[in-house]
Image: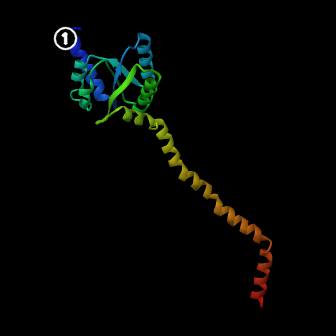
Amino acid sequence: MNRAAKEALVAQLNEAFSQSSLLIVTRQTGMTVFESRELRQRMRDAGARFKVAKNRLARLALEGTPYEGLRDRLTGPTGLIWTDRPVETAKATVKYTKDSDKLTVVAAGFGAQILDAQGVEQVAKMPSLDALRGRLAGLMQAPAARLVGLLPAPAAKIAGVLQAGSCKLPRVLNAYARKDAA
C-alpha cells in the first residue's frame, strides 16, 4: 500500500469514527476467511462496519475523534467495529464473542466514555432505540386512554340516576303541584 492509499484510508476511517456513536476495539486471532466474512455480515445486519487495520494507521485515524483514548489499546491483531446504532451492534458483538473464541472485545468508546469488555456487555443489555420509542409511545397513550375511559362515566351515572328516578318523578311533581295549589 503506497503513501497516498494509506492517507486516504486514514482520512476515510477518521471521518467514519467521527460520525459514529460507538467504536469497539477487538482482538481476533486465528479467524478464517469464512469466519471473518460471517462477522462482517453480522455487523452489517446490526448497522455496523468491521475493519482490520494496521494499528499505526488506526491510531492516526483516531486523532481528532472522541475515541482518542483508545489509542493505547491498539496492539496486536486488531479489528475495529464502528456504528451509529450502539445497542444493536453491542448485542451482535457480544453474541459473536460468545459463539466464537477467536474474537474478544478489548475496549470501546461510547461517546466520550471509554468502556472495557464488561461495559460493552452493559450496553448490549440496554433496550434498543425502537424498544424505547415503543415504551415512550405507550406511556404517552396511557393518560389519554384513561381519560377516554372516564369521560362517559359521569354521563352514564347521571342517566342511571335519572332512569331510576323516572318512576318516582311524576309522583314528586304531583306532590309539588298540590303543595303549590294549597
- In the rendered image, which residue does mark 1 sit on? 3
Query: Mark 1 Cα within 10 Å, few/some/many (few <14, many 20+)?
Result: few
Q: Give the structural element (helix, strand or loop) at label 1.
A: helix
| Residue at 43% across, 28% down | 94
Q: Please identify the quadrant where the C terminus is shown.
A: bottom right
Question: In the image as oriented, which residue stretches furthest toward the bottom?
Answer: 182
| Residue at 37% across, 35% down | 119
Q: Position of residue 22 (x, y in %)?
A: 34, 31
Position above or below: 137 against 168: above
| Residue at 42% across, 18% down | 39
Q: Is 180 positioned to the left or the right of 60 in the image?
A: right
Q: Position of residue 114 (x, y in %)?
A: 30, 34
Q: Position of residue 24 (x, y in %)?
A: 34, 27
**Closer to the camera, 30 or 92?**
30
| Residue at 31% across, 29% down | 19
**Closer to the camera, 16 or 81?**
81
Q: Is 95 positioned to the left or the right of 180 in the image?
A: left
Among the 4 quarters of the image, the one containing residue 88: top left
Q: Please identify the quadrant where the N terminus is shown.
A: top left
Question: How is this picture coloured?
Answer: rainbow
Q: Is 161 positioned to the left or the right of 120 in the image?
A: right
Tally of marks:
1
Question: In the image as oriented, which residue stretches furthest toward the left?
Answer: 3
Position above or below: 155 against 105: below
Among the 4 quarters of the image, the one containing residue 63: top left
Q: Position of residue 91 (x, y in %)?
A: 44, 30
Position above or below: 72 against 139: above
Q: Amino acid at mark 1?
A: Arg
